Amino acid sequence: MTAEEKERAERAQVIRNEIEENVSLAGASFLDRSPIIGAINPIAMPMTITTSIDENGRINVLGSVTFGSAYEGPPGCVHGGIIAAYFDEVCGVAQSTTGNPGMTVNLTIDYRAPTPLRKPLEFRAFVASTEKRKIITSASLHHGETLCAEATGIFVSMRPEIFERLTQLRDA
């Protein structure tokens, strides 16, 4: 590993730590509750999330998952609604790298090819742009070299007091 690669890996770890800090709640991880990647959520088909920084300094989020038969839509393929939920999650992690995490206001998906069950899949996402409180993400889903779907997510950053109020309402 070159010094540059080591520096990128260290920066990516710092970013992962910041993501978790931005969405953590009084001793309990917000991400642990996720129905997509939540370690303590019994319905989650865990997607492994990693981050990297490319040569331009852009943070890339990668989600790796293999869906079993419970996620079937068309014969032998992942249900489109499941794909949408996973795009929402990976785009949500990407948008949180801005340090001003928000909520999804729009998620647009273009399905390009059938997404196979029981095969390793990779979701890729990054922040495409920010405009005041609006965070726009771009994402793709791949099975090997096959592009299965593409997504654009629009998020609006949430003021910390609103996030705290939602947390209090949930816990009440």
Image: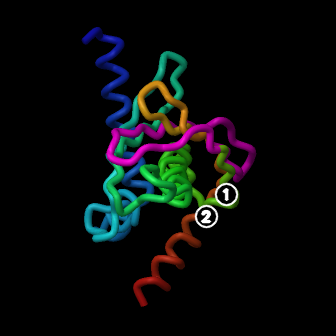
Decide whether residue 149 is among the magenta residues. Answer: no
Q: Residue 170: which quarter of the image?
A: bottom left
Amino acid marked by disc 2: Arg
Q: Which residue is nearer to you in this view: 106 or 157?
A: 106
Near mark 2 (Cα within 10 A), the count class, few <14, some 14-19 or many ≥20, is few
Q: For numbered disc 2, what is the local secondary structure? A: loop
User: Where's the N terminus, which quadrant?
Assistant: top left
Q: Is residue 138 visible?
A: no
Range covered by the magenta-colored residues: 111-138
Query: Residue 126 in magenta?
Result: yes
Q: Position of residue 154 (x, y in %)?
A: 68, 51
Label disc, if present, on residue 159 of the rendered structure: 2
Q: Main secondary structure of the magenta part?
A: strand
Residue type, label 1: Val
Residue located at (36% from left, 52% from top): 67
Instruction: Where is residue 151? Give x, y as percent.
Output: 63, 44
Choose mark 2 or mark 1, whichever is in front.
Answer: 1
| Front in this rendered view, residue 155 or 147 | 147
Q: Which mark is residue 52?
A: none
Q: Residue at x 35, y 68 (%)?
A: 33
